[in-house]
Structure formats: structure tokens, C-alpha cells
């Protein structure tokens, strides 16, 4: 395997420069049939393709090497390096191979056939809360593992959380690591990044970026999945930014008419201005909202010992009791177990 070294450590911007994946100069189309477009951003097009030899389907992300007249190869190498670092994270899409043409570097990614969870935020029919909690739990599992490895995503939004299958609703896969950064290597990270509706207040204020920045976005995603509304979207960018910096969120009963108190409590704890007051991904995973009463919905990744310890420390003050949602609080063996969890499974760091 070729090893490319542009920079031995992450640089002052938190970019990684070392990759293991060989970038092939073979013509991708000689080996794959392109069968459609899956998505498009400013500098990337993602196409569905099938390997000629095996019929196996992948998503090919074509990334422009030059953007606004500037060579952006380093950014693409960084995106690949982050994907490689997350190879063992089951909630992150897998990088299979890479190709290069005169204009693009093409990342051949694991195909997430179920589309974006965004479709479920804007659909006439919202997902039942038990499905939402499953998707949020899986998102937190992925984010927790990223944060453990010192990586922040910084562009978590419903368009970047995909599903393995649509019907039945599959598992989530996090994509789009173009804005992800390595924290802690050198000094503080302050950059204007992200998408207005999903961006955290500290980014607007040019304050330090931390793992808590991603947790804000998880709060926004949870809000959108349960209400079908974007909490901070204004008439224009300026109004959106103002809503974010003032944490101007609609918790009215119209928006939350069919939403449990526990869901509101979860969201309220994430959409707080001070990053240090937001729970970590690990803390979030112990929130009682995420452990619904259905015995079939077991955690798909282990809950580490540190979470059990933290969860008994009273991080989650109980929300006001909702008579309509009592079973979530009182009848759920999981909710009880993850708050007072004498018998919760014990896992080592190595399991993660
Ligand atoms: P951009 O940086 O342009 O936002 P993304 O990596 O987010 O690029 O990809 C754009 C869109 O393409 C996604 O929002 C999604 O709809 C689709 N997409 C990306 N990766 C995959 C994948 N692995 N499987 C299926 N669809 C994908
Ligand atoms: Mg994207």
C-alpha cells in the first residue's frame, strides 16, 4: 500500500495529512458502471455505481481538486484520512478505494441505500418516536467514537446522516467529513465552518470549537426529526444566525404537540448556548428518552463503564412528569437500568 505523507501531524487547522489508501489513476468507469446521481454539493457530486466484476454497489464521491482557483488536494487527503481513522466506527461510512482524474479525486464509499434522514424531517409523515430515538442513539454512538479519537465532525445535519436501508428503516451512517477536524493537536481551533441552520453559537462568535459543537447539531437533528421543523431557520441567513446566537427555539405546544416530555428535555439540554453546559455524547447516551420501553430495542453498541458512572451522577435531572408518557419513565426496564444501572453491561475501552 502506498503511503502518502503531506504533513506528519495534523497542522494548525486540524487537517490530517497521512493516508493509507492508494489513489488509483485507473479509469473508474472501466471497473464500475455509473447508475445514477445520489447527491450534489458545491464541490462534490456523489454517484451510485456498480462494480462490473461483482455487481456490488458503491457511492462514488467526486471531489474537485481545484476550488475557487485554489488547489484543494490537502483537504481531500484530510477527508480520506478522517474516514480511514474511523474505519472501525460502525456508524461511519466505509472508504473502500480512491481514484484520481485530471480534475477530481473520487472516493469510493460504502453505499447507504436508505437515503438521508433529512427526508424524514420534511416528510408529511414523521417517524414514530421509538424510531427517532433509535436513530439518535446510533448517531450518538458514532459521534462518541469520533470524539474518543479526537475528531469533531462539525457538519452534522440530517443531510449527512444516511440510512443503510429505507424499508424497513435501517441503521445510520455518518458521511461528509470535509469539515471534520482533529482537536487538541495544536492549540485551539476557531474557524467559521458549517451550515447556517445547524451551526452552533460558538462558531458564530469565533469561540473555540470543541466536541460540544457536534452535540449542538445532534440537538438540532433531534428537534427536526420529532417536529419536522428546523429550529433556527429564519427568512434569511442573518435571521438564522440571530436565532442561533440568541438560542431562539420554539418549544411551543403547537410544535411539540405529539412529542414526549423526555424528547423535549433531551433537546433542551443540548440546545444551550454555553458549550460547557452541554452533555457529552457519552452523557447523552444515558438519557432516559433514548431507552424506550420496547424490549426488542437493545443498544447496538456497548455502553462503556464511564457512562454508567456518569449516568448515576445526576447529569439528567428529571423533566417535568408527563402523564401521557409515563411508561417512558416508569415502566421501561431500560430507562431504569440506564439511570440507576446496577446491572448494566460492563465494557472496556477496547470494546469501543
Ligand atoms: P458534500 O460535501 O457535497 O455535502 P456529501 O458527502 O455530504 O457531500 O454527499 C452529498 C450527498 O450525497 C449526501 O447528502 C447524500 O445524499 C449522498 N451521499 C453521500 N455519500 C453517500 C453514500 N455513501 N451512500 C449514499 N448516498 C450518499
Ligand atoms: Mg454533505
Image (tube, helix red, strand yellow):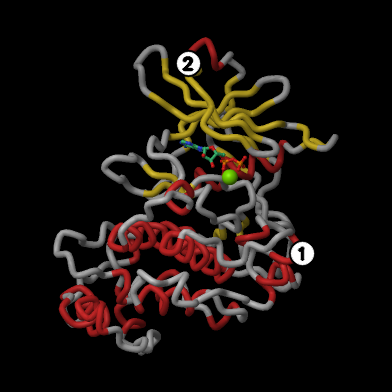
Mark 2 and 1 residues: CB-CB less than 8 Å, in contact?
Answer: no
Task: Give the residue drawn at x 68%, y 26%.
Answer: 104
Task: Give the residue drawn at x 31%, y 45%.
Answer: 170
Residue lying furthest right: 69
Task: Give the residue drawn at x 51%, y 61%.
Answer: 229
Counting residues from the start of the chain, the first of labels 2 and 1 encountered is 2
Residue 94 at what x, y percent from top left?
44, 39
Tell me the quarter of the picture where residue 131 sits. Answer: bottom left
Residue 58 at what x, y percent from top left?
44, 28
Number of callouts: 2
How packed mark 2 is, by other alpha carbons closer than 10 Å (few <14, some 14-19, many 20 or more), is many
Marking on residue 32? 2
Task: In this rendered view, identify the residue nearer to me: 232 or 154.
Answer: 232
Residue beneath disc 1: 238
Report whether residue 311 is seen.
yes
Residue 292 at what x, y percent from top left?
24, 69
Residue 74 at what x, y percent from top left?
71, 41
Report whether residue 313 is seen.
no
Secondary structure of the residue carrying numbered label 2: strand
Residue lying furthest top: 30
What is the CA distance from the residue labelled 2 to the residue labelled 1? 44 Å
User: Which of the image's four quarters has the C terminus?
Assistant: bottom left
Secondary structure of the residue carrying numbered label 1: helix
State which mark lies toward you, 2 or 1. Answer: 1
Amino acid at each position: 500500500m502506498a503511503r502518502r505523507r503531506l504533513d506528519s501531524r495534523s497542522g494548525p487547522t486540524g487537517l490530517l495529512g497521512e493516508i493509507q489508501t492508494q489513489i488509483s489513476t485507473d479509469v473508474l468507469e472501466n471497473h464500475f458502471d455509473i447508475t445514477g446521481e445520489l447527491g450534489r454539493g458545491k464541490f462534490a457530486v456523489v454517484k451510485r455505481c456498480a462494480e462490473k466484476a461483482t455487481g456490488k454497489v458503491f457511492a462514488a464521491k467526486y471531489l474537485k481538486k481545484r476550488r475557487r482557483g485554489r488547489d484543494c488536494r490537502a483537504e481531500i487527503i484530510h477527508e480520506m484520512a478522517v474516514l480511514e481513522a474511523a474505519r472501525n466506527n460502525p456508524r461511519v461510512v466505509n472508504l473502500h478505494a480512491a481514484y484520481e482524474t485530471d480534475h477530481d479525486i473520487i472516493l469510493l464509499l460504502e453505499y447507504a441505500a436508505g437515503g438521508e434522514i433529512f427526508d424524514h424531517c420534511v416528510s408529511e409523515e414523521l417517524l414514530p418516536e421509538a424510531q427517532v430515538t433509535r436513530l439518535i442513539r446510533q448517531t450518538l454512538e458514532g459521534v462518541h467514537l469520533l470524539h474518543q479519537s479526537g475528531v469533531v465532525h462539525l457538519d452534522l445535519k440530517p443531510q449527512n446522516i444516511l440510512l443503510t436501508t429505507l424499508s424497513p428503516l435501517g441503521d445510520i451512517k455518518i458521511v461528509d467529513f470535509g469539515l471534520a477536524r482533529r482537536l487538541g493537536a495544536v492549540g485551539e481551533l476557531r474557524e467559521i465552518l458549517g451550515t447556517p441552520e445547524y451551526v452552533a453559537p460558538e462558531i458564530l462568535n469565533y469561540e473555540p470549537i470543541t466536541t460540544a459543537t457536534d452535540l449542538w447539531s445532534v440537538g438540532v437533528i433531534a428537534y427536526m426529526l420529532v417536529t419536522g421543523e428546523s429550529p433556527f431557520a429564519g427568512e434569511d441567513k442573518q435571521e438564522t444566525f440571530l436565532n442561533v446566537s440568541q438560542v431562539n427555539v420554539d418549544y411551543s405546544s403547537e410544535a411539540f404537540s405529539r412529542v414526549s416530555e423526555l424528547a423535549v428535555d433531551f433537546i433542551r439540554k443540548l440546545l444551550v448556548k454555553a458549550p460547557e453546559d452541554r452533555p457529552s455524547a457519552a452523557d447523552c447516551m444515558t438519557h432516559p428518552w433514548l431507552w424506550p420501553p420496547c424490549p426488542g430495542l437493545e443498544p447496538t453498541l456497548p455502553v462503556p463503564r464511564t457512562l454508567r458512572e456518569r449516568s448515576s451522577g445526576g447529569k439528567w435531572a428529571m423533566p417535568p412528569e408527563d402523564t401521557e408518557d409515563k411508561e417512558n419513565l416508569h415502566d421501561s426496564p431500560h430507562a431504569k437500568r440506564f439511570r440507576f444501572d446496577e446491572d448494566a453491561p460492563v465494557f472496556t475501552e477496547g470494546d469501543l
